[in-house]
């Protein structure tokens, strides 16, 4: 005995091309929806992770453009100007401050990197405070520096992989012709730390002739402290600027949300096109089968039976399209991420498109809703067909 | 009829699963690539008009058995954190119009003071047309990256490199490889790393592309 599902399925197979094209339309809409919602979630979580993994909530740098400085710090680049190390001591004395970590970023040109050379960056960190602030960092091999001024390095996983370094190996700073001993290789974190070469702060100052100079001070504020008031206080320090990372996040998210509105509008249009496509397909299918529906009704099928049959056809189209669209979104998530990174070069590290099980369920919910809504009118029209009129109309 | 219908229904989730499997493959990491393939392929292979990029790995091609075979041909074990079975290798098929004219392939190798990226340009027979250090962290980088050093490898193939023992760093006295001169004696460690990288590179290409064409010249240690 053939059931209603098989009847609906066979009806769709009668017009393979039309059903196929409608499924493609729905799949594309589902793909756009999953990718955009995945991007929305992934971008925010990657940005939060990047900022949280800095280990501090506030960054004091020498005066310059705060957004450029913050972006460069997030990407592991160099600061624009230098400030004196004594500022770190001043900041440390503030009652709101829990911990302070001074940093000095330097870069050298390596003529033997690529066809026309390239830059290597080195981050000098304070061995007493930096590891404590970055307590989440784990070692694949080795450990932190043995001495505050040792010519030693701890390498992020990707930096170590590029240089093929392991604990115990030597690393050369090309322009300075200085050898460093690799004492540790970090595990992957998915953040800017993966590509960073860490050295003791004093060693960087000595190697690059930057005694008492810093490019940044990371500040961890006490939990009970009022960050806004503290920030105001920091602004009074001479020749420095304060970058509150919550502000940076807010600013970046505001910029991104403008782009998101546009992208969500496109998704909405894609969904509307899919809805219209489904209505069109099912309605045409109903019109072509007037006589058949009339015969079914004359044989005893109720209006509700016909309504169910047509509605089921719509649902099959939408669910199939939803499965393909979601699978396509997952399959192309990496490619989507590569594309986004080309469009947004300063995007945070880590996965930019996060497609979770909940998101897949949500998309299916939306797709089924599309199916249910767009199926109502054609199903209602089919259910209202009068058997004799329908049979006669096509005979004539 | 009902059975046919059920088969069609089953084909949909199967297609979705296939797409999901592709997604897992796409998440794999990428190994030693040319920094700027458009520019680098044209420069390394004059006369070429295009290229196609392929990714291939020992784990996909043959797993631990293939690794053991490659190590035997190399005369050394893969070692360290980064020289592993799951490293994806990037192979560039080079074209002139629609005609394939050669290959470019690179590997990472551990040097004395940093990573070395050894690229080799091959014709369709597996003969070296050009040798290129894309990256070389060394005190003697200038000398080793000099074109005169790279020119010593032109015309050689894996057949010649079987005469080179990567463990001892010595080549058979009568071999072509023995004629390759290290421009800076102090850079011996990087020189040997370059030769090991090149031999590994040629063995991988022989396995991945040339269907082990050069295996006939291989003599196992003690054989």
Image (cartoon, coloured by chain):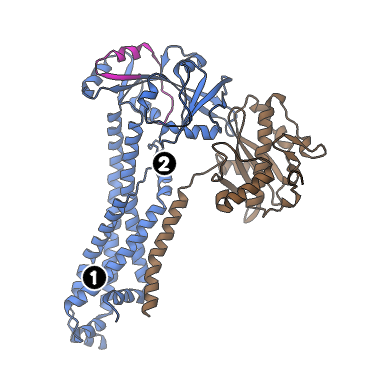
Chain colours: A blue, B brown
Residue A219 figure quarter = top left
Question: How far is mark 1 from mark 2, CA to CA?
Answer: 42 Å
Quadrant containing the C terminus of chain A is bottom left
Residue B204 lies in the magenta stretch: no
From the top left corner, tell me how far across and down residue A345 is, in percent: 41, 37
On screen, residue B146 above or below A300 = above
Residue B189 visible within the image:
yes
Residue drawn at x 38%, y 64% is: B13
Subunit ID for the residue under disc 1: A
Dot 1 corresponds to which residue? Answer: A311
Mark sitting earlier along the chain (1/2) = 1
Nearer to us in this view, A285 or A203: A203
**Residue found farthest to the right:** B174
Dot 2 corresponds to which residue? Answer: A341
Nearer to us in this view, A143 or A58: A143
Nearer to us in this view, A152 or B30: A152
Subunit ID for the residue under disc 2: A
From the top left corner, tell me how far across and down residue A257 is, in percent: 28, 41
């Amino acid at each position: 005995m053939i059931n209603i599902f098989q009847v609906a399925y066979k009806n769709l197979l009668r017009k393979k091309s039309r059903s196929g094209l409608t499924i493609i339309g729905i799949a594309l809409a589902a793909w756009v929806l999953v990718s955009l919602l995945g991007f929305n979630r992934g971008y925010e979580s990657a940005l939060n992770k990047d900022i949280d993994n800095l280990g501090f909530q506030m960054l004091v740098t020498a005066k310059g453009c705060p957004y450029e400085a913050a972006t460069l710090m997030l990407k592991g680049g160099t600061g624009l100007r230098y400030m004196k190390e004594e500022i770190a001591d001043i900041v440390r004395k503030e009652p709101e401050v829990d911990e302070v970590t001074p940093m000095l970023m330097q870069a050298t040109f390596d003529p033997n990197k690529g066809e026309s050379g390239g830059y290597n960056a080195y981050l000098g960190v304070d061995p007493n405070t930096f590891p404590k602030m970055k307590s989440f960092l784990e070692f694949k091999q080795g450990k932190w520096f043995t001495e505050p001024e040792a010519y030693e390095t701890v390498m992020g996983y990707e930096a170590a992989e590029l240089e093929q370094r392991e604990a115990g190996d030597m690393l050369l700073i090309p322009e300075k012709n200085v050898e460093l001993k690799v004492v540790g290789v970090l595990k992957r974190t998915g953040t800017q730390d993966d590509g960073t070469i860490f050295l003791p702060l004093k060693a960087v100052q000595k190697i690059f002739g930057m005694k008492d100079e810093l490019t940044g001070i990371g500040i961890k504020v006490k939990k009970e402290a009022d960050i806004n008031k503290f920030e105001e206080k920091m602004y009074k320090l001479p020749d420095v600027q304060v970058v509150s990372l919550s502000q940076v996040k807010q600013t970046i998210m505001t910029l991104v949300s403008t782009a998101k509105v546009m992208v969500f509008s496109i998704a909405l249009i894609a969904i509307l096109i899919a809805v219209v496509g489904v209505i069109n397909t099912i309605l045409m299918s109903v019109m072509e089968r007037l006589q058949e529906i009339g015969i079914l009704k004359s044989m005893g099928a109720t209006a509700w039976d016909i309504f169910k049959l047509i509605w089921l056809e719509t649902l099959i189209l939408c669910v199939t399209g939803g499965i393909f669209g979601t699978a396509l979104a997952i399959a192309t998530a990496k490619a989507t991420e590569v594309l986004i990174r080309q469009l947004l070069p300063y995007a945070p590290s880590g996965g930019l498109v996060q497609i979770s099980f909940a998101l897949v369920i949500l998309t299916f919910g939306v797709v089924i809703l599309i199916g249910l809504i767009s199926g109502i009118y054609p199903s209602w029209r089919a259910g209202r067909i009068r058997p004799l009129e329908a049979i006669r109309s096509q005979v004539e | 009829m009902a059975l046919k219908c059920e088969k069609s229904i089953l084909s949909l989730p199967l297609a979705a699963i296939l797409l999901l499997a592709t997604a897992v493959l796409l998440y794999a990491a990428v190994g030693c690539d040319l920094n700027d393939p458009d520019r680098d392929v044209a420069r390394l292979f004059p006369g070429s008009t295009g290229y196609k990029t392929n990714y291939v790995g020992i784990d996909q091609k043959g797993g631990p058995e293939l690794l053991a075979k490659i190590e035997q041909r190399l005369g050394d074990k893969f070692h360290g954190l980064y020289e592993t079975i799951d490293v994806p290798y990037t192979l560039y098929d080079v074209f002139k119009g629609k005609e394939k004219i050669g290959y470019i392939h690179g590997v990472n190798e551990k040097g004395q003071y940093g990573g070395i990226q050894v690229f080799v340009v091959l014709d369709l027979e597996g003969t070296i047309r050009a040798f290129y250090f894309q990256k070389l962290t060394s005190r003697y980088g200038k000398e080793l990256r000099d074109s005169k050093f790279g020119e010593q490898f032109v015309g050689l193939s894996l057949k010649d490199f079987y005469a080179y023992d990567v463990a001892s760093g010595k080549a058979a006295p009568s071999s072509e490889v023995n004629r390759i001169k290290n421009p800076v004696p102090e850079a011996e460690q990087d020189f040997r790393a370059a030769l090991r990288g090149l031999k590994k590179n040629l063995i991988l290409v022989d396995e991945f592309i040339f269907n082990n064409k050069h295996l006939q010249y291989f003599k196992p240690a003690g054989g």
